[in-house]
Amino acid sequence: MSKVKKGERTIFVCDGKKCCRYNEETKSCFKALLEESGLSNDYSVCKMKCQGMCKSAPVVYISSHDKYKKEVGAKKAKKIFQEYIIA
């Protein structure tokens, strides 16, 4: 996987051993929000390798803001979307 530069529009969801047990809802939520807002061509949702934050699964990385977010379920994904993607 290549390095992501700040400003690129990708939402990464950890797909490590523990995160992959809990991240399906998160990925689906981000994809649906992007589709609903018409931003699915501007942003992509991708998986990333384990980030070593297994106690905080699932972990999300917002590349355009260089931010990691922990314990992201559907409710938190919506807040992240409003704060970092729509804003």
Image (cartoon, grey):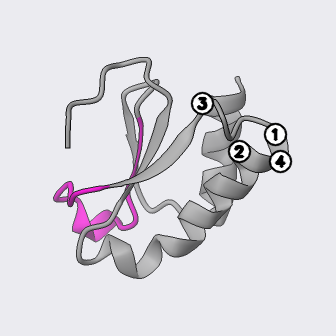
- Checking the image for residue 36, the label placed there is 4
Task: Check disc 2 and report the residue beneath it.
Answer: 34
Which image quadrant: the C terminus?
Answer: top right
Q: Do the numbered discs 1 and 4 sit on residues whose CB atoms are within 8 Å?
A: yes
Q: Is residue 61 above or below residue 87?
A: below
The image shows residue 42 at horizontal and vertical percentages of 63, 30
Inspect the image, locate mark 4, and give the three-letter code of the amino acid beneath it: Glu
Q: Amino acid at mark 3?
A: Tyr
Residue 67 falls in image quadrant: top left
The amino acid marked with disc number 1 is: Ser
| Mark 3 vs 2, N-terminal side | 2
Q: CA distance from mark 3 to mark 2?
A: 12 Å
1 sits to left or right of 65: left
Check disc 3: other Cα within 10 Å, few if <14, some if 14-19, many if 20+. few
Element carrying mark 3? helix
Image quadrant containing the N terminus: top left
Q: CA distance from mark 1 to mark 4?
A: 4 Å
Q: Which residues are magenta?
A: 48-62
Taking the spot 68% from the left edge, 41% from the top edge, the residue there is 40
**CB atoms at circles 1 and 2 under 8 Å apart?**
yes
In terms of sequence position, does the residue under pointer 3 or pointer 1 come before the other? 1
Q: Which mark is residue 84?
A: 3
Q: Nearer the viewer, mark 3 or mark 1?
A: 1
Horizontal side of 66 relative to 18 (left or right) equals: right
